[in-house]
Image (cartoon, helix red, strand yellow):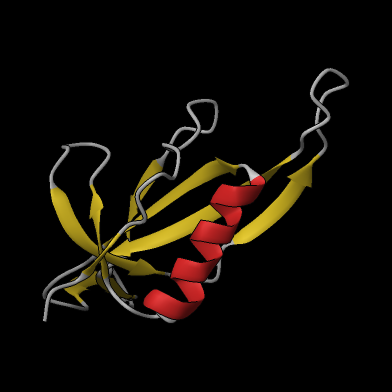
Amino acid sequence: MANNAWPAGLPSPLSEDDPAYEPYDGFVRSPMDTGPGKLRLRFTGVNDKLTFALKLMPAQRVTFWNWYWNTIQQVGQFDFTDLRTGVTGSYRFNKRPSEKYVAGDALTGQGWWLTAIVLDLV
C-alpha cells in the first residue's frame, strides 16, 4: 500500500527555526568493574528524528489538522521530502504536534499558528 503524501500547500519549515535531525541512541552501555564499559548495538537499524516548525495561516492550519486526524489518523506513515537531501522518504509523527497562536501585526491584523513538528524517519 502506498503512503499518503504530505499535504500540498503547506509552507516550508521556518528558516529561523532550522530543522534538526537527531539519531536515536541505538547503543546499550554496560558498566564493568574495571576498565571501559561494554558497548553493543541495541537495534540493527536506528531511525532519525526530525524536528521543525511551521508557520501556518488559519486556512493552512485547517488543511494540516484535517490531514493529520482524517487522512493519516495520527499514526500513519506518509511521504515527506528529506530536508537534507531532497529525497522523498517514509515518515511518521513521533508525537502530536504542538501549536501556539501568534497575534497579527497592527497593519494586517491576521494572526498565525506556530506549529512544532517531530517526525521519525521510518
Residue 42 found in image quarter: bottom left
Q: Is residue 27 above or below residue 57?
A: below
Q: Is residue 115 visible?
A: no
Q: Residue at x 23, y 36 (%)?
A: 84
Comparing 10 with 117, the one in front is 10
Q: Is residue 118 above or below residue 1?
A: above
Q: Is residue 111 left or right of residue 89?
A: right
Please state the horizontal and vertical placement of residue 16, each as a whole percent of the image.
Answer: 54, 26
Q: Is residue 117 above or below residue 29?
A: above
Question: Which quadrant of the figure contains the N terminus?
Answer: bottom left
Q: Residue at x 27, y 39 (%)?
A: 83
Seen as rendered, the residue at the extreme top is 107
Residue 61 found in image quarter: bottom right
In this figure, what is the number of numbered marks? 0
Question: Which quadrant of the figure contains the C terminus?
Answer: bottom left
Please state the horizontal and vertical placement of residue 87, each as a whole percent of the image.
Answer: 13, 44
Please state the horizontal and vertical placement of residue 78, each as a whole percent of the image.
Answer: 27, 67
Q: Residue at x 83, y 37 (%)?
A: 103
Comparing 111 with 98, the one in front is 111
Q: Is residue 12 visible?
A: yes
Q: Residue at x 55, y 49 (%)?
A: 60
